[in-house]
Image (cartoon, rainbow, N blue to C red):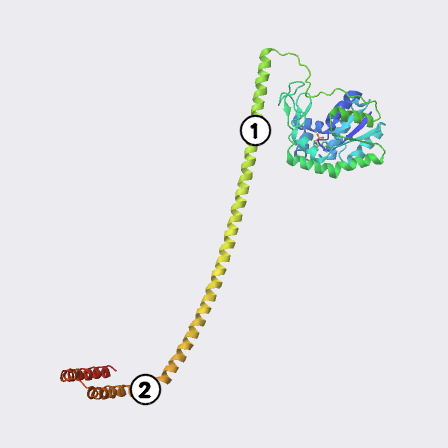
Amino acid sequence: MRIVLLGAPGSGKGTQAKLLAEKFTIPQISTGDLLRAAVAAGSPFGLQAKAAMDSGQLVSDSIVLGMIEERLAKPDTQKGFILDGFPRNIPQAEALDALLEKVRMPLDSGLLIDVDFEILLQRLTGRRTCESCGQMYNIYTSPSRLDERCDKCGGNLRHRTDDNEETIGNRLRVYEAQTAPVAAYYRGQGKLRSVQGIGEISDIFIAIQKALGEPAHAKPVAAPAKPAPRKPAPIATQVKQEVAAAVATVKAVKKATIASIDKTEKKVAKTTKKAVASAKKTVKTASKTVKTAVKTTVKKGVKAAKKTLASAKKSMKKASKAVATKSPAKKAIVKKAAPKKKVASKKVAPKKAPAKKTSVKGRAIARKTVPKKKVSAKKSSKKR
Ligand code: AMP
């Protein structure tokens, strides 16, 4: 059985490849694993591959093809193989065909495991792999019971360095652009089989066997809920392991907390900066508006005042002209009026006295009264 497993990062290719390899007792060949081993060993291949892997890009075809050729030449591939993560683009698919044709071992199937984008993201960010036995976990969907340790062998669980959000984004984009067309390539050869990669691992495995035309069995999966019994270690070792596990958990929690605090702080700083900038802008705009308004109002006020002043001046001019024209007549009237009043008061006094028939006493009083009237008349004429 010679199979190529296709699917986006996080689609579960690795998990299903292991199960198929076990079922058919053939090797699982993962170019990702081979490259990671080369990086860990510090080989020249590994050093060249690391930068591309860390950024989520594809490693150069020449490196990958060299590794695959070397691996397929090993005797354990005679019965068959499961290729996991290879080919990743059309040139690799064509090179593989050429290679297999040379040794007369053509491919049987290209098997695509199809999964939605959102689920892929959750799977990739939560993915943990045992450093010792390769058992895979997911902190969201299938966590290990011992937190940072493998339920199967007690090994350390590792979070792949390229399973961070930025690199994941790149890997998914690269998959869409370069790897997805490989499915069409095998469809064109009539070799493509496809299954939905959502649900229980054992159910997906059954679907895969059926798609390959094989009798399907729900092979017991090394589920996290049922950890395989381990050989009891000496008490001291057990305690040591428990302590190490506890320390690892505390460290992981601390790391996660610090990362979360850092993230929140950055967010708050960014928001504050934005708010201050926007407030400054508002103040600037407001002061500009006020300045313009004041300027306009003052201008209007000055104009109105000038107008009022001009009209006041005009009125004053008119009034003074009018006064200048009317004043001689007034003076004349005043002059004429004054002597008339004097004469009237003088004439009134002698007429009134003889008209009254009074007693001697009364006449004496009258005489006394007359001179008084004359004085008052004279006084009033003087006033005028
Ligand atoms: P994987 O474990 O299959 O997800 O691969 C991890 C990384 O190894 C990828 O993101 C690539 O950088 C690199 N890689 C794995 N397989 C290939 C391949 N066939 N061609 C190019 N790069 C690969």
- The residue that label 2 is drawn on is 333
Quarter containing the N terminus: top right
**Mark 2 residue element:** helix
Are there few (<14), some (14-19), or many (20+) residues within 10 Å of tag 1?
few
Distance, label 2 to label 1, CA atoms, is 113 Å
Measured along the vertical axis of the image, is residue 179 above or below residue 203? below
Q: Tell me the residue at 54%/33% (across/down).
A: 261
Are there few (<14), some (14-19), or many (20+) residues within 10 Å of tag 2?
few
Along the polypeptide, which appears first: circle 2 or circle 1?
1
Image quadrant assignment for residue 166: top right
Between 186 and 32, the one nearer to me in the picture: 186
Ligand 1 contact, mark 2 (Cβ < 8 Å): no
Q: Is residue 329 left or right of residue 110?
A: left
Instruction: Give residue 217's position: percent from left, percent from top.
Output: 80, 21
Instruction: Give residue 360's position: percent from left, percent from top.
Output: 13, 85
Observer able to see residue 186: yes
Between 92 and 304, the one nearer to me in the picture: 304
Residue type at numbered disc 1: Lys
Q: Tell me the residue at 71%/38% (across/down).
A: 173
Q: Is residue 78 left or right of residue 240?
A: right
**Mark 1 residue element:** helix
- The residue that label 1 is drawn on is 255
Instruction: Give residue 104's position: percent from left, percent from top.
Output: 86, 27
Between 20 and 62, the one nearer to me in the picture: 20
Quarter containing the C terminus: bottom left
Q: Is residue 106 left or right of residue 41?
A: right
Residue type at numbered disc 2: Ile
Q: Tell me the residue at 52%/47% (across/down).
A: 277
